[in-house]
Image (cartoon, grey):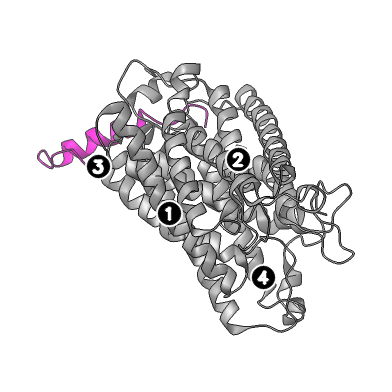
Amino acid sequence: MVHALGSTTTDTGTTAWMLVSCALVMLMAPGLALFYGGMVRSKSVLNMMMMTFGATAVVLVIWVAFGYSEAFGNDLGGGLLGDPRQYAGLAQFLAPSADAGSSFPVILFVVFQGLFAVITAALISGAIADRAKFTSWLVFVAAWVVLVYAPVAHWVFDATSGTRAGGWLSSQVHLVDFAGGTAVETCSGASALALALVLGRRIGFGKEPMRPHNLTYVMLGAGLLWFGWYGFNAGSALGANHQAAVVLMTTTLAGATGVIGWLAVERLRDGHYTSFGAASGMVAGLVAITPSCGSLSPVGALVMGAVAGGVCSWAVGLKYRFGYDDSLDVVGVHLVGGIVGTLGVGILATRIAPTGVSGLLDGGGAALLGRQVIGVGAVLVYAFVVSGVLGLLIERTIGFRVHRDHETGGIDLALHAETAYDLHTTAGGRASTHGLLGSLHSHREDHS
């Protein structure tokens, strides 16, 4: 997906497809909230969901103010950043004249890209589940969109068009990333790792069981994510065309074999198949096909999904080996899966696919793989360093981690004065109500 929009007349079919794609990507936010919410313990499910909804609100405000302009404004030099003033407020896109040269209203592209920013930010929250202050999380998201996501989106998604310069990875390195293996998956995974290190491990990590409290939520959320991913990937074709159809197919195939790859490793390692593994494998396959969906054959997509499912199933165990607490395996699935998918383009890409590039197995040599390595490395290092610095600044000023008592007792009650499930009996009437209110007031968030 690139910023260069190419037709001279507005096409109603393409416009309709982009409207649907925006809606599908928007659906990924509540899908992720359910997916993550089911993974945590019952005492923090509302907070986990609120982190996604809160990120959605903050990111969209920043995107309108100047985030889109940072990502897709005229390059300020070197392909590093767009002009944050150029489209500030987005008023330029309200008139039909703004759509000259585009096959659909440009404001749809703005919304589409804003929703990419939403889901990328929300993904990070899974690494710090059960222990982050909600206020501090929102502050982090606002700063992160400005300092990390928008610049990286400019590097990857904003292509050179005519005399207009684009981002350096797209226009100078010629990275092949159809829908965000670097800008979304690697960026969110590296940022998640940085925050997990800043906040430290949950109380009881590695000693107490921290099982998903509702696997039904996990499976439902995964299904919504798969459905939304069609807008994410096929919508990135920016048209109702053959390219979108091919991408939809490769996305479907990789999601399917992601399940198979994860379950195969799970069966060999643990002796059984789990619903949690099936949902995670599906996501791993979709993560890996995100950058490669326009570059692979159907067989290539099957291979990509299976490899990603297997590798990510193994990678989620790295947190126990190295001692970092990535609560919901954002690093193991999104960072590792994004790397597998992006580098996999350099190996499995075929010239007959829509992007028209050849990987090693198609006789293309090592040049494409080298470009993919540069793209992954640059985004990983930048996102990790800047996110880590942001996390440390917040921790040292307003504090990022909740009070120990709140973490132990449950942050839903402490931070939001709510519980996900009403387990109290109604017997006792007024006395029970007063008791609950007293409990709520005694668990307010500390310094937030």
In this view, the mark in front (4 or 2)? 2
At label 1, counting other C-alpha atoms closer than 10 Å, the crowd grade (few under 14, some 14-19, many 20 or more) is many
Mark 1 lies on residue: 225
In this view, the mark in front (4 or 1)? 1
| N-term mark: 4 or 3 | 4
Please say if 110 is above or below 55. below
Q: Which residues are magenta?
A: 421-448
Q: In the rendered structure, find residue 107 and report the number of the disc placed on it.
A: 4
* Residue at 35% across, 22% down: 408
Question: Can you give x and y, in whole percent of width and height, for residue 369 in the image?
Answer: 69, 42
Mark 3 lies on residue: 421
Question: Can you give x and y, in whole percent of width and height, for residue 372 in the image?
Answer: 69, 43
Q: Please, what is the three-letter code of the amino acid marked with disc 1?
A: Leu
| N-term mark: 3 or 2 | 2
Viewed as shown, does residue 284 lie left or right of 110?
A: left
In this view, the mark in front (3 or 2)? 2
Q: Secondary structure at mark 2?
A: helix
Q: Secondary structure at mark 4?
A: helix
| N-term mark: 4 or 1 | 4
Please say if 25 is above or below 13. above
| N-term mark: 4 or 2 | 4
At label 2, counting other C-alpha atoms closer than 10 Å, the crowd grade (few under 14, some 14-19, many 20 or more) is many
How far, Cα to Cα, is label 4 from label 3?
A: 40 Å
At label 4, counting other C-alpha atoms closer than 10 Å, the crowd grade (few under 14, some 14-19, many 20 or more) is some
How far, Cα to Cα, is label 3 from label 1?
A: 24 Å
